[in-house]
Image (cartoon, rainbow, N blue to C red):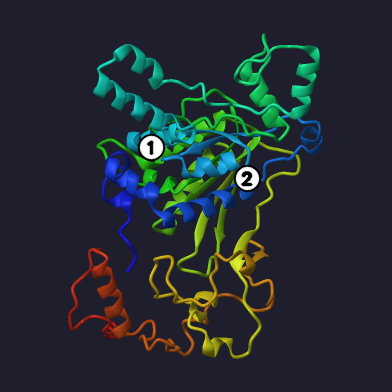
Amino acid sequence: MPAPRPELENPPEVFYNATEARKYTVSTRVRTIQREMTLRALELLNLPKDEAATAAGLNRSALLLDIGSGSGLSGDVLTEQGHVWMGVDISRDMLHIAKEDELNYYDMGAAQKAAAAAEEATHLTSSSSNARFDTSHVRWGLVSSSSDGDAAESGTDQDDDGSSEGEDPEEVGNDSGAHGESTGPRMVEVLQSDIGAGLPFRPGTFDGCISISVLQWLCHSTKKGEVPQRRLMALFQSLYNALRRGAKAIFQFYPSDSGQVHMITRAAMKCGFNGGVVVDFPHSARAKKYYLVLQAGQVQGGFVPPPALTNEVEEDDNADDDSNDDSALDGEEYYGSDEEGEDDVDDDPRDPNSRKRVRVGGRDSQHPGKRTRAASTHGQKRRRKDNRPASGTRDWVLLKKEERRRRGYQTTADSKYTMRQRKPRF
């Protein structure tokens, strides 16, 4: 039985309170999945690489926008990849954790707590207030040995931060980061805003945009007067203006049905975007991921849809008899649990060794002539390997209705007329 969807319980600013935000951030499973999806989003973003600028030592890191940044889990991955990012989220508790991580990165959070304890013990306000924001131990950049030798030969005095007199220490840190010796200060620039009301950024600001597990929140109205279609249009219109020409935006989301996918895609196309939805592992109920790939404006060559990911199917004549997840691979409905991390499937679709590139279309590249659809419903009905009733029978309908009741859906009561064939009309 799948876990309840959080967007159906409370609005995001209420659901992700201080307790839930801390629990979400410290979860190892959440951090692992978030990292995998962020790396996949960067792969779909396909940022241009300037090899000549990198060889010349110039900084060509992209400025990215993280919609629904939360506590900065995706932002950490962007920083590791050498990009500068800004985050937008509606939960103040999530953003507070992101800023705390920035202070702890430089050990400034511990220094502030120690200074506060010293102030309470000694009742000295003047000295403790100065020590509370003491950042003399923080070094924003590294100076190479050649620079030290040149400075020693020229006789120029250097201060404690490693920069010569009349030279800005931040310029030294940025120059060293461009040459790969240091990545510079880890800044977390976030702002609290409702993305359904639009993004407050200047036109052409960002080189790209990513969003992880956020877009489905806009498909539900939590207040009187909120219309999901209008909120999606406001987001995509302001995002289209904030992106430079040819930039891409990647949205990973969890739609509840195909209607939400159609509503989101139609709103994006109305705002001028080009693109579509890429589904990774389309035949796996647990590893399936939806990515909305959008491109702002027309570029030379047009929009090229990126390939999706799928698990590799081995050529084995006895695979259908020995495998327990054959229904997930041949297009039939899968009745397993939607929770990740179970050991029901032998081959983990998230394993990088089992990934294989395919075309977005649904055919297996290893078996071009074999369709991934199930057999016709008018033919002989096959019974599943797990002894479940065949689809279209009375037992199958009763089983599906019981599953809907367990999930909390409104379901018609069972009666003697359930699945009874009607008499022919006169």
Could you tell which of marks 2 and 1 lies nearer the N-terminus? 2
Left or right side of 251 for 113: left
Secondary element at tag 1:
helix
Secondary element at tag 2:
helix
Image: 28 above or below 42: below
x, y (%) of residue 194? 38, 33
x, y (%) of residue 284? 50, 69
Q: Amino acid at mark 2?
A: Leu
- The residue lying at 38 percent from left, 49 percent from top is 26
Image: 361 above or below 306: below
x, y (%) of residue 420? 26, 84
x, y (%) of residue 209? 56, 38
Residue at the spot of label 1: 97
- Closer to viewer: mark 2 or mark 1: 1
Image: 112 above or below 66: above
Residue at the spot of label 2: 45
- The residue lying at 43 percent from left, 37 percent from top is 101
